[in-house]
Image (cartoon, helix red, strand yellow):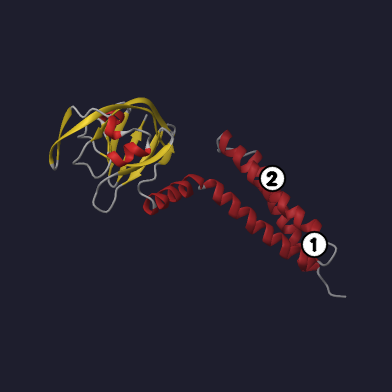
């Protein structure tokens, strides 16, 4: 019969190391209380994995038990590392999503939205206006949320029945707009209601997210290629 004394000794060593780790975590000395508690949780999890693998493998052979123990320890360490760096992974995921869909608002905190700039340096925002998706160009120089006639139709307005009496100076010259009120604009977790807007009769190729929305925010800050909006 094959002698498995060294394998069993290895298993005993793993269990003993886990036990020592638990005791060290429970009585950390110079470690802070919160740190000690987190280490204790990690150690208990590690000991549980080692014990579970031992129970599963003891019937076959000590070698199998050792292999299973090492596999579970690897999984446990992966989970611990993932939990410890969860904020880093979340930030990385947010950055990747921003690069793939720059107009998609990324929630980066309570009431906080981050937008990524496009290749030409502009910021686009995919918003829900009265429950309908509308893509807007963020424009701090626009006094209102300005809608193209096409977007106005999609929102249920009848452009031919509006009164275009408000003059606006656009890049294409003087244009006239009709004042309307939008029941709700949602940009990620940011929601504003009864927002003043204008439907442009001409001279506008892209709807604008202007100051009637932006001016109600707590802050609006550009950090490199990111625009951060806070409600």
Report if residue 143 is visible in the image.
no
Q: Residue furthest right?
A: 1
Instruction: Please give the name of the residue rendered at 34% of the width and 33% of the height, measured from the top-left corner.
Output: 157
Closer-to-camera residue (10/96): 96
| Image quadrant occupied by the C terminus | top left
Judge from the rendering whether residue 97 lies leftward or rightward of residue 27; answer left or right.
left
Q: Residue at x 81, y 69 (%)?
A: 4
The residue labelled by disc 2 is 44
**Residue, far front:** 160
Instruction: Tell me the quarter of the image containing the N terminus.
Output: bottom right
| Residue at image location 77% in from the left, 63% down from the top | 65
- Can you give x and y, in whole percent of width and height, for residue 90 in the image? 47, 46
Give the mark nearest the N terminus, 1 or 2.
2
Q: Is residue 149 above or below residue 179?
A: below
Q: Helix, strand, or loop for circle 1?
A: helix
Residue that mark 1 sits on:
57
Residue 199 numbered tag = none
For the residues labelled 1 and 2, the Cα–Cα distance comes to 20 Å
The image quarter in which residue 170 lies: top left
Looking at the image, residue 39 sits to the left or right of residue 109; the answer is right
Callout 2 secondary element: helix
Residue drawn at the location 79% of the way across and 63% of the way down: 8
Q: Position of residue 223 (x, y in %)?
A: 29, 42
Residue 141 falls in image quadrant:
top left
């Amino acid at each position: 019969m094959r002698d498995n004394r060294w394998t069993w000794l290895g298993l005993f060593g793993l269990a003993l190391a886990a036990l020592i780790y638990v005791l060290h975590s429970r009585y950390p000395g110079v470690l802070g209380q919160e740190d000690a508690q987190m280490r204790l949780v990690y150690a208990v999890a590690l000991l549980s994995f080692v014990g579970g693998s031992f129970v599963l493998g003891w019937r076959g052979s000590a070698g199998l038990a050792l292999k299973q123990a090492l596999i579970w320890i690897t999984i446990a360490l992966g989970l611990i590392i993932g939990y410890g760096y969860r904020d880093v992974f979340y930030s990385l995921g947010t950055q990747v999503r921003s690069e793939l869909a720059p107009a998609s608002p990324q929630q980066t905190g309570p009431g906080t939205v981050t937008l990524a700039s496009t290749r030409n340096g502009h910021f686009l925002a995919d918003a829900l206006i009265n429950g309908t998706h509308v893509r807007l160009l963020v424009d701090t120089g626009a006094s209102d949320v300005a809608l193209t006639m096409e977007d106005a139709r999609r929102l249920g307005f009848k452009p031919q029945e509006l009164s275009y009496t408000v003059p606006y100076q656009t890049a294409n010259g003087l244009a006239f707009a009709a004042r309307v009120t939008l029941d709700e604009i949602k940009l990620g977790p940011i929601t504003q209601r009864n927002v003043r807007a204008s439907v442009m009769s001409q001279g506008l190729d892209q709807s604008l997210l202007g100051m009637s929305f932006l001016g109600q925010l707590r802050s609006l800050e550009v950090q490199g290629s990111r625009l951060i909006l806070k409600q």
